[in-house]
Image (tube, rainbow, N blue to C red):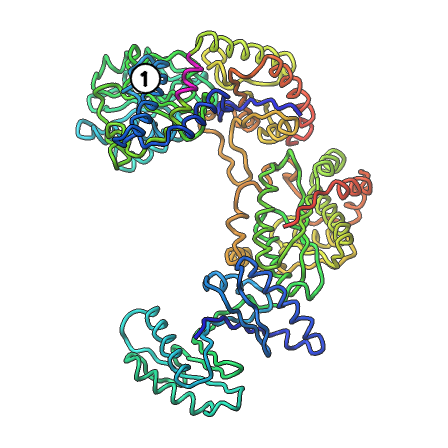
Amino acid sequence: MEKVILIRYGEIHLKGQNRPFFEKALHKNIIKALSGFPDVKVIKAQGRYYIENFSDEAGVLDALTRVFGIVSVSPAYKTEKDFDTVAHAAVKLMELYLDRQGGDGPVTFKVESRRADKSFPMDSMTLSSKLGGRLLKAHDRLTVDVHAPQVTLNVEIREHAYVYNESIPGAGGMPVGTNGKAALLLSGGIDSPVAGYMIAKRGVELTAVHFHSFPFTSDRAKEKVIDLCKRLTRYCGAVRLHVVPFTKIQQELYEECPDSQLTVLMRRFMMKIAERIAEKEGALALITGESIGQVASQTIESLVVTNEAVSLPVFRPLIGFDKVDIMEIAQKIGTYEISILPYEDCCTIFTPKHPVTHPRLDRIKASELLVDGDTLIEEAVGNTEVIVL
Amino acid sequence: MEMIYLDNAATTPVLDEVVEAVADCLRNYFGNPSSLHRLGIRSEKLIKEAADSVGAVLHVDADEIIFTSGGTEANNMAILGTALARQRTGRHLITTAIEHPSVLRVFDHLKSQSFEVTYLPVDKSGLISPDRLEKEIRPDTTLVSIMHVNNEIGSIQPIEQLGRIIKSINPNTVFHVDAIQSFGKLGLYPKKWGIDLLSLSGHKIHAPKGIGALYVKKGVRLQPILFGGGQQRGYRSGTENIAGIAGLGAASKFIRRELETKSAYLYDLKNRLVAGLKDALPQAVINGSLESGAPHIVNIGFPGMKGEVLLHALEDEGVFVSTGSACSSRDRTVSHVLKAVGVDDRIAGGSIRVSTSYLTTMDEIDAFISILASVVSRVEKYSRR
């Protein structure tokens, strides 16, 4: 009797001819996610994976539930295909379950069997009812309820027998790397890491772009973005973080352009630079954390003006989200605590007191001509620092 | 790039002779000072020697020195220890509005435990009024805690005079002085000045972080805040940090050598700095008072600018200072000290703190002035319109 973890994946079944490609990506991502557990074995089986040879079950489960493409995982016992051995495992598993539940009241259960290996002498109905009998005898607290049981004991007879009674939801989505690459505009705030997470969940590989305005923002702000990126890598694998020196652009805009337009102008520059970096990195889209109306630069008018700056598609997965919903996801993925550290943009100098909320594209474009945009962008891209996380 | 380190009120570089003392201790004195065998006795002797060195700076006995994990613990121990030990005598405590958080937060806690706390205000120079103190002391006042040199603006309280006042009105009132910024910079005479408890910290005087001490005058009762094996005569349980203690001892020896000459040198640096500022940056405002200020701390305000931006721009040129006031997008609180001395918010937000040490050179001050002037003119353009 050996402890294993059974991994189920769902959506990638839909992909017909592409299935081997998706499965290979998932396999690779699982191996990567478990790289911290030295002797662990990842075994591919029909429509699922098994993890074997681990000691830190909780750690492995935690790592697996962050791998996109996994629908659910179950810690299971792998045994000989022999009724008594299977029954022994089932009794043990239920004992652990009852201990975890605590108390001493009755607990309802049912047994579900699947017999993929038809050479096993019992059919699944017989196996279920005989196992149920064993369990009832072993644990006084158990009573059968086939309609709405508190716990279901599953048995699968395949190349081996697998017994489990728990199914932990995975991260869902699709394996990272199966849907191309996009460039995420990553500030230090709450929204952008969540936006990155959501797109990565659809199998998209991320490359990140951060704008740094030293000395107007501190190096701690940069460290914070590095920490955020590291958090994201737990879900989406390695990320190349591009730290773009943005001070000069802000200063020029501040000196040459109308105060009220600064934010919109700045955002257009950010988009243009991100697009340049995306092209270099082979990313086919940009990702932002914008949500309609959240701030002045996120009114529809502002979004239109910002959007016009680039020709790549811009993914805005949070566009219809309320702040509280975004915060909830940020908490779930562990970026919230980092995002709320107070280094985001210590310097408000470049934020206008009265920003335009309904910018007009013609006026913004006219203002843009007041600075030498191409040279500024060229220089910023040229001096970008790349940090591999 | 040459580094010009002017953030010595935050912490100081460790002196070579201190590093050697610490290393020697780590290598050769691993015995637990409480052990009965000779290895323990060797360690115990080392502690005694360090206590001698620290005591010598204060002109007090070695057995009046209790080693702590640093200034914060010394302050906590002094204030909590006195308030709790004497709560049956009274529950009234006095402190000032410009104390360090390691004092103010302790009083906050005591307030929540139904102690009564009087906060003495300060004038524009950052000084409390001795008359006001005199009026506030009552029969049930068990503790007065006043910092010697303020860590943000450098104001020096007339401790000797205050000690005299306290003891003349209520001889039973315990007088605690937070001398973390003044130890090793100014002369300190606890016995002469009527001080019962005095806190100091190692890393402000070129010793490592994690070591400090509290002078406890003989006969002063303190309730411990750490309980355990009863080390340091029960005042402070916990196996002694001998390496840190050796470091503090070595640093104390260093500062004691010609302390007056050293102190005078710091004043020379300050005069040079202030004269240079007047010349190169006439718009700069000195927060607090120059005359009543410590030799090593100058708080400079640039109206309408942002202290943190100046700090980072200076850092880019290899110059390290502190902001005079907190600045962040979420936490816009102005420093409680600058507020207490009535500095305008526009100036407070644009303030930096420059703090020197004996290792600072005149050339560095000159270089700093010219770098600051160029940084200010560069950043000034981007002040809030």
In the image, residue A228 above or below residue B336: below
- Say if residue A246 shows up in the picture: yes
Q: Amino acid at mark 1?
A: Arg
Picture quadrant where residue A23 is located: bottom right
Seen in the picture, residue A75 relative to B167 is either above or below; the reply is below
Name the residue that disc number 1 marks: B132
Q: Is residue B162 visible?
A: no
- Between B138 and B241, which is closer to the camera in this rendering? B241
Give me the residue at 54% from left, 27% from top.
B322
How many labels were placed on the picture? 1
Residue A336: x and y in percent read: 52, 52
Q: Which region is colored magenta?
A: B249-256
- Dominant secondary structure, magenta: helix
Q: Position of residue A274 (x, y in %)?
A: 73, 50
Residue A318, quarter of the rendered image: bottom right
Lateral position of residue B136 relative to residue A317, left or right: left
Around disc 1, counting alpha carbons within 10 Å, would you say few (fewer than 14), some (14 to 19), or many (20 or more)?
A: few
Q: Quadrant of the N terminus of chain B?
A: top right
Q: Is residue B334 above or below residue B168?
A: below
